[in-house]
Image (cartoon, grey):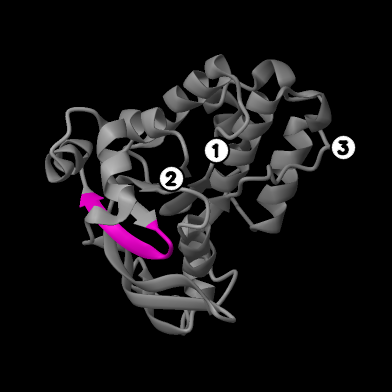
Amino acid sequence: MNVLELNNVKKYYKDVKALDGISFQVNENELFGLLGVNGAGKTTIVKLSTGLIDYDSGSISVCGFDVKKELDKVSQVVNLSPQETSVALNLTVLENLNFFKDVYGVKDENIVDELINSFHLEEFKNKKAKTLSGGYQRRLSIAIGLISSPKLLFLDEPTLGLDVIARRELWNIINNLKSKLTIILTSHYLEEIEALCDRVAIMKSGKLLAIGTVSEIKKIANKDSFEDAFIEISGGLYEN
């Protein structure tokens, strides 16, 4: 089943084409990467697919639900961990998770403890979020995104601004989530996309330039390294 499907989606901001006829599908339990320089359209796709903003033409469906016509159903199966952490800084880790559990109307009484354990937040659960390091705030933010048990989770630049150790620790957590749900990851870090993603879409200026596994992307560009392949493709020589 296609968990996410975009068909010829266009989005304009006045005279700027944020998305210029984007089409692709994401499979169930896939970790799919969106890669591109600033202004490529990655975050626009995230916002459109979660119903935060509207698109001008085309169609988007999540788990078979039309985003425009069935947003209430889409909201039940999708969640987002944004670039800016969504935590309440003056609440503790435990209070944050319980607050969002109530917001989403989650009935599972074990979900909070399970997320605290999964994200290794046990020793911090009674500490205010503002006292946590950036890496642990990101862990909490992703845990909040999972509180509703979504079928599709968007991770928008999850390791932005983290040091290399915190980034690798978060990679391990994301890897452990792979088999449990579908994840769409936006990132500027080539090594992150290469390490985590089953497939990747390379975008530039609202267009889809290439899509496939890392190996397929390297083959398309006739390059041995993913970095060289990305530079070659994002130079505009290839278009899907």
Question: Which residue is painted at 21% across and 62% down in the image?
Answer: 240
Residue 31 spot, x, y in % from top left: 33, 43
For mark 1, give the secondary structure: loop
Q: Secondary structure at mark 3?
A: loop
Name the residue type under label 1: Pro
Disc on the earlier residue, 1 or 3? 3
Q: Quadrant of residue 51?
A: bottom right
Looking at the image, tell me whether mark 2 or mark 3 is earlier in sequence order: 3
Decide which of 209, 33 is in the foreground and name it: 209
Residue segment shown in magenta: 204-211
Crowding at dot 1, Cα within 10 Å, few <14 / some 14-19 / many 20+, comes out as many
Q: Residues within 10 Å of mark 3 (few under 14, many from 20)?
A: few
Residue bearing the label numbered 1: 158
- Point out which mark residue 90 bears: 3
Q: Amino acid at mark 3?
A: Asn
Mark 2 burial class by Cα count in 10 Å: few <14, some 14-19, many 20+: many
Q: Quadrant of residue 132?
A: top right
Q: CA distance from mark 2 to mark 1?
A: 8 Å
